[in-house]
Image (cartoon, rainbow, N blue to C red):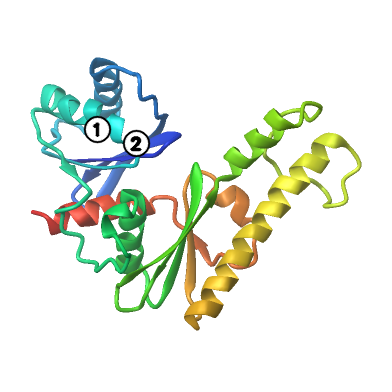
Amino acid sequence: MLLVIDVGNSNTVIGLYDGDKLVNHWRVRTVADHTIDEYGMLILGLYKMGNAGSKSIDSIIISCVVPSMLNILEPLCKKYFHLTPFIVGPGIKTGMPIYYDNPREVGADRVVNAVAAHEKYEGNLIIVDFGTATTFDYVTQKGEYMGGCIAPGVMISSHALFEKASKLPPVELSRPRSVVARDTVSSIQAGIMFGYAGLVDGIVNRIKKETKTESTVIATGGLARTITAETTTIDLVDEMLTLEGLKIIYSRNI
C-alpha cells in the first residue's frame, strides 16, 4: 500500500492508497515541535484504523512546504515503516515542465496539484488551493506549468482582523444572510466571505484575461467548499486533488 503525506503550514493531510483506490484519508494539525515518536504513533495509529486489512505499507511519498517537518518525517518513515520516502522536490520526476524563473521556488503542493489537475481534467486549467495561503496556478492544455499568484489565506486574513481590531470578536466562518448586515458578527462574516469570494473571482478573471483562455477552474484545499459556494468562477471542487497528485508522481518515479 502507498502512504501519501501532504504537509501544509496549518494542516497535514494523509492518504492511504491500495493501488488506485483511496482507502482512507485524514487531516491533522501540522505541529513542527512534535517529536518523531509522537508523529510516528499518530500515523501508525491512523494506518491501523484505516481499513487496510493485513496489507502493509510498502511505499511513502511526501510533499512538504514546512522544511523542518522533513526532519521529523524522513526518520519517522525509516523507524516505523523501514522505508525511505520519496520527497517531492528537485530531482523527482513529475512529467510536467515548470516555466518559472526559478523552478525550485515553486511549492511542492502547487506542483502536485498541477500534475493531478492535468492528469484528471482536459484543457487549460486554473487551480485554486485554499490553504494557509490561497494559491492560483495556471496549467496549459499541453500540461505546462506557467506560474500563478499567492494571496493570504482566508484564516490568516481573519486572524489578522481579530488581532488588530480590539473590539471585533472572533467569529465562525459561515455565510451571513445579507451583505448589508445589521450586527457585528454578521458584518464580519459578510466581509470575510463575500470579500474573499470577490478576491478569488477577481484573480481568476484576470488570469483568464491575461492568458486569453477559457480555462476550467478547479478548487481544492480545506476551505474550498466553504468559499466556492460564494464564487462565480469556480467550476468544480476536488478535495482529494493533492493526494491524487502524490499518487501520480509516485507512479512516475517507480
Relative image position of residue 172 (x, y in whole percent):
69, 34
User: Left or right: where does residue 162 sit relative to residue 11?
Assistant: right
Do tag 1 and tag 2 residues touch (Cβ < 8 Å)?
yes
Relative image position of residue 107 (x, y in whole percent):
34, 50
The amino acid at mark 2 is: Val
Q: Quadrant of the C terminus?
A: bottom left
Q: Residue placed at 48% from the left, 72% from the top?
A: 216
The amino acid at mark 1 is: Leu
User: Left or right: where does residue 154 sit relative to residue 77?
Assistant: right
Residue bearing mark 1:
70
Badge 2 crowding class, 10 Å Cα cut-off, few under 14, some 14 to 19, many 20 or more, is some
Q: Secondary structure at mark 2?
A: loop
User: Left or right: where does residue 12 sit relative to residue 126?
Assistant: left
Q: Residue furthest front?
A: 101
Relative image position of residue 37 (x, y in whole percent):
24, 16
Q: Residue placed at 82% from the left, 48% from the top?
A: 177
Any part of residue 230 in sight: no
Relative image position of residue 179 (x, y in whole percent):
82, 52
**In the rendered image, the vertical position of residue 213 relative to residue 129, given as above or below:** below
Q: Quadrant of the N terminus?
A: top left
Residue bearing mark 2:
66
Please count the marks in the image.
2
Between 188 and 122, the residue placed more toward the observer is: 188
User: Left or right: where does residue 118 sit relative to residue 60?
Assistant: right
Q: Residue furthest right?
A: 182
Between 20 and 77, the residue placed more toward the observer is: 77
**In the rendered image, the vertical position of residue 54 relative to residue 195, given as above or below:** above
Any part of residue 33 in sight: yes
**In the rendered image, the vertical position of residue 218 relative to residue 6, given as above or below:** below
Q: Secondary structure at mark 1?
A: helix
